[in-house]
Amino acid sequence: MTAEECPYHPTTLTDSSFNERATIAWKSKELTLDQVSKKINSGSNVYIGSTACTPDAILNAMVDDYKLADLRVVQMIPGGTLPHMSQTVDRFRTCSFFSYRKTAYYKKSGGRESLADYTPISIASIPRLLEQKKLPVDVAIIKCTPPHKGFISLGIGVEHTHDFMRSASVVIAEVNSHMPWTEGKSKILASEVDWWVRHDEPMPTTEKLWPDLVKVMTKGDPQKNVEEKMARNVINLVDDGATIKFGWSPLTFSIFPFLKERKNLGLHTDVMTD
């Protein structure tokens, strides 16, 4: 069905009738957390949002349903509590496109990295791999805003979430009123969501997403002192007016405070937060 053929598409309705029919259609898709795992079949390839857009409430519901097994969870950038990571691989096997050790310092007890599969990949290749079915996805679980005039916003989860949604047979949304509304490609029709649950909680901070990384950055840590000295050496190589790009590492965070010593800097980055 094309967007224009959709009975809830804004181009086919007046404002009042669109809002009314879109609201009725949206309400009919609401689930409780006890019901959501029933919409996911064992053996599915499941995409989940990244970092602060990780649908923690739905993940907890999936973990609690012991009938679910043989799930492959695909996540671009891990972060947060990630309850499925404590499960055996015959229940949940996780694949990430960014290494935990390099990005999140997420480790399970015993000091071992709990990542099952790591796929080094260019982020620009993901839409093509989805289109060619080389990256299979059956269910997309996202976090989004409540609907407004027939639309939802993916907020800060705009990496390739919409591409995964289009490739999935089932789209489940964790609706959170704390998710900021963003425009552009993050604004999509609410009709693209098959099922949704309401779970309002503040968006997680860096401290909650990557506690081990924050610990490394804490002042007084011996490693922190070494990284500050390294950052001082690095900033001496940066001239006024330079264009810089940041990667993912504790050293990157150590460099930030020294940037105030430079002027007219340009920024080129695929990752930008406050």
Image (cartoon, rainbow, N blue to C red):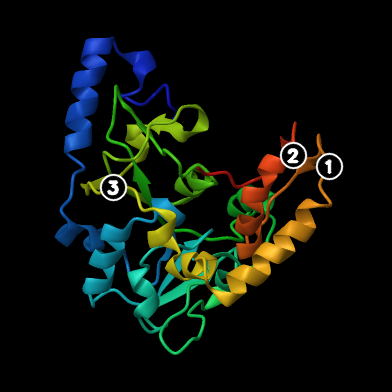
The amino acid type found where label 2 is placed reads Arg
First in sequence, mark 3 or 1: give its number. Answer: 3
Q: Residue furthest top?
A: 14
Is residue 229 positioned above or below 169 on the image?
below
| Labelled disc at residue 262 | 2
Is residue 212 positioned above or below 201 on the image?
below
Q: Are marks 3 and 2 in contact (CB under 8 Å)?
A: no
Secondary structure of the residue carrying tag 3 is loop
User: Residue 5's spot in the image, x, y percent?
Assistant: 39, 24
The residue lying toward the viewer, choosing from 207 and 232, is 232
Q: Which residue is mark 3?
A: 202
Mark nearest the camera among 3 and 2 is: 2
In the picture, residue 17 is in which quadrant?
Answer: top left
Residue pictured at 69% horizontal, 56% vertical: 122
| Labelled disc at residue 239 | 1
The amino acid type found where label 3 is placed reads Pro
Secondary structure of the residue carrying tag 2 is loop
Residue pictured at 62% horizontal, 69% vertical: 225
First in sequence, mark 3 or 2: give its number. Answer: 3
